[in-house]
Image: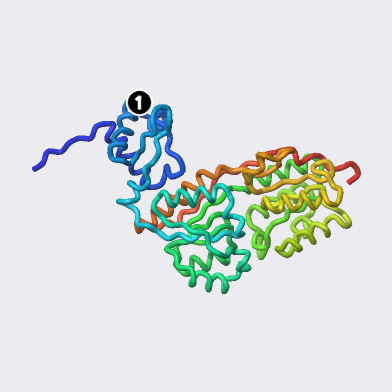
């Protein structure tokens, strides 16, 4: 009988870290020794020894003095994960240029998978179940990442037993892996701020599947907050519009014809930009004449002057969660966990009190 050998403290820490690494916990970035020591409650010397063990196993790459170690994903995935062909189905083709989606695609590749963007998007398919069904059958993939889909679309994916991750979208009560920012609290904060400044005529512009047949929790939160503030809500607060460039311009023209809103909340970055351009074209200034908020988290907002009032969240937990999902299902594990990330309202400089007499 072989004598059992007790693992040293450093070896135990190394085993724990290896388990975390394989689960995708450190998919986006690997922390330094000091941060890991504090997190796990072990001394720095033990942590350094544990990290050196993982270097010898070629799990970690030492990039030199004062440089962070990085994961050797080829070494990790080469023995553990089955390579998955993962289709990324965006709501708009322009999503392919969004920074965190590019980073997600790169990290999936680093983890040994084969992600690819589909040649059509949800809006190009009209969010239509029949069209999507035909499209999915023609595009073979082991798993799908679906961005900002309607409840009906996500229910269809779930009913077909297709391994799917809902990146945002209307996924509540649908048995499907998902993650999204918890925008409800942030939009309540934004609405309260507008009302506190004196705004009474506030319009939220968002896609059809977010407002009908039933408003999403985020949209409902904004409408409920208006009612709590004594503002009777109507279609003015949540206008119907055709989801085309022409349709968006038409609803903006219509809103500003008779009794214009003093504040607009645009659900996506492109809607914010288009609204800003439209207001400028009709001689209205932001925020002097109209306040403007975006509920999207666009990194390009950091370059804007005046600073954009918007809802912000950390994209890193989103990326890490999707990597864990991909690695879990590649190992044959079922994963339909749904997660949220904290979101907050950034006041910015595109909101101000409404014009006098409005």
Identify which residue is drawn at 64% across, 52% down: 218
Q: Position of residue 203 (x, y in %)?
A: 77, 53
Residue to which mark 1 is pinned: 43
Identify which residue is drawn at 73% across, 38% down: 305
Q: Position of residue 300 (x, y in %)?
A: 65, 44
Circle 1 crowding by C-alpha within 10 Å: few under 14, some 14–19, many from 20: some
Q: Position of residue 198 (x, y in %)?
A: 82, 42
- The quarter holding residue 315 reads top right
Identify which residue is drawn at 59% across, 55% down: 95
Q: Quadrant of the N terminus?
A: top left
- The quarter holding residue 244 reads bottom right
In this rendering, would 203 be left or right of 31?
right
Task: Answer yes or no: is residue 37 visible.
Answer: no
Residue farthest to the left, as pictured: 1
In this rendering, would 239 be left or right of 16?
right
**Frontmost residue, 30 versus 67:** 67
The answer to whether residue 256 is above or below residue 317 is below
């Amino acid at each position: 009988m072989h004598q059992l050998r007790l693992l040293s403290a450093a070896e135990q820490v190394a085993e724990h870290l290896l388990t975390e690494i394989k689960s995708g916990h450190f998919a986006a970035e690997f922390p330094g020794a000091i941060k890991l020591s504090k997190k796990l409650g072990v001394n720095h010397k033990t942590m350094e020894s544990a990290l050196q063990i993982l270097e010898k196993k070629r799990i970690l790459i030492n990039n030199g003095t004062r440089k962070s170690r990085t994961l050797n994903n080829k070494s990790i995935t080469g023995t553990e994960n089955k390579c998955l062909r993962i289709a990324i189905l965006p709501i708009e083709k322009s999503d392919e240029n969004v920074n965190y989606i590019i980073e997600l695609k790169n990290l999936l590749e680093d983890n040994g998978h084969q992600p690819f963007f589909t040649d059509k998007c949800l809006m190009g398919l009209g969010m239509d179940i029949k069209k999507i069904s035909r499209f999915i059958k023609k595009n073979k993939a082991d798993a799908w990442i679906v961005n900002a889909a309607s409840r009906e679309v996500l229910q269809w994916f779930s009913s077909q037993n297709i391994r799917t991750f809902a990146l945002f979208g209307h996924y509540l009560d649908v048995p499907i892996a998902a993650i999204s920012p918890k925008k409800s609290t942030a939009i309540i904060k934004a609405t309260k701020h507008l009302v506190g400044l004196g705004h009474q005529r506030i319009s939220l512009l968002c896609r059809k599947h977010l407002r009908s047949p039933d408003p999403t929790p985020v949209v409902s939160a904004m409408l409920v907050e208006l009612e709590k503030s004594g503002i009777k809500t109507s279609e003015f607060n949540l206008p119907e519009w055709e989801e085309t460039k022409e349709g968006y311009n038409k609803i903006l023209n219509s809103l500003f014809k008779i009794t214009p809103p003093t504040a607009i909340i645009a659900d996506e970055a492109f809607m914010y930009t288009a609204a800003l351009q439209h207001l400028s074209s009709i001689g209205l200034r932001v925020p002097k004449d109209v306040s403007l908020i975006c509920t999207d988290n666009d990194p390009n907002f950091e370059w804007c002057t005046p600073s954009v009032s918007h809802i912000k969240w950390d994209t890193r937990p989103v990326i890490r969660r999707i990597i864990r999902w991909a690695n879990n299902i590649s190992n044959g594990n079922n994963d339909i966990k749904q997660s949220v990330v904290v979101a907050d309202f950034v006041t910015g400089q595109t909101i101000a009190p409404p014009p006098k007499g409005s």
